[in-house]
Amino acid sequence: MAKRKPNPEFMKPVTPDAALAAVVGAKPLPRTQLTKKLWDYIKKNKLQDQKNKRNINADDALKVVFGGKKQVSMFEMTKLVNKHVS
């Protein structure tokens, strides 16, 4: 079975804007690393909803990234984060 090659789009560095940089840092990084850093931040600050693990509760830094929302689903989070990278 052929080994899957990583999608080059995921490996291409993206630059977080100021709002997202407050959470993951300002250096350009691949989407895979960006997602990992985002999850590290969520876990470190215990922002995953305890009742429904698919929801993320925003602290002040994430609320800016989430467009002012107090809580978003994992899928919605991905969409919202994409607005903050170039």
Image (cartoon, rainbow, N blue to C red):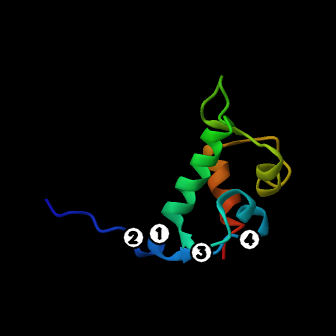
Which residue is most to the top? 51
Query: Which residue type carries mark 4?
Result: Asp
For disc 1, the marked residue is: 10
Label 3 SS: loop
Residue 14 lies, in percent from the top left, at 59, 74
Nearer-N-terminus badge (1/4): 1
Q: Earlier in the sequence, mark 4 or mark 3?
A: 4
| CB contact under 8 Å: marks 1 and 2 | yes
- The nearer-to-camera label among 2 and 3 is 3
In this view, the residue in front, 1 or 14, is 14
The disc label shown at residue 17, or none? 4
Q: Amino acid at mark 3?
A: Pro
CA–CA distance between discs 1 and 3? Answer: 13 Å
Q: In the drawing, what numbered circle is on residue 28?
A: 3
Q: Nearer the viewer, mark 2 or mark 4?
A: 4
Q: Residue at x 45, y 72 (%)?
A: 11
- Image coordinates of residue 33 in percent, x first then y, are 51, 61
10 Å neighbourhood of mark 3: few (<14), some, or many (≥20)?
some
Q: Which mark is residue 7?
A: 2
Q: Residue at x 41, y 75 (%)?
A: 8
- Residue in the foreground of this view, choosing between 24 and 65: 24
The secondary element bearing badge 2 is classed as loop
Quick check: marks 1 and 4 in contact, CB under 8 Å?
A: no
Sequence-wise, which precedes: disc 1 or disc 3?
A: 1
For marks 2 and 3, the one nearer the N-term is 2
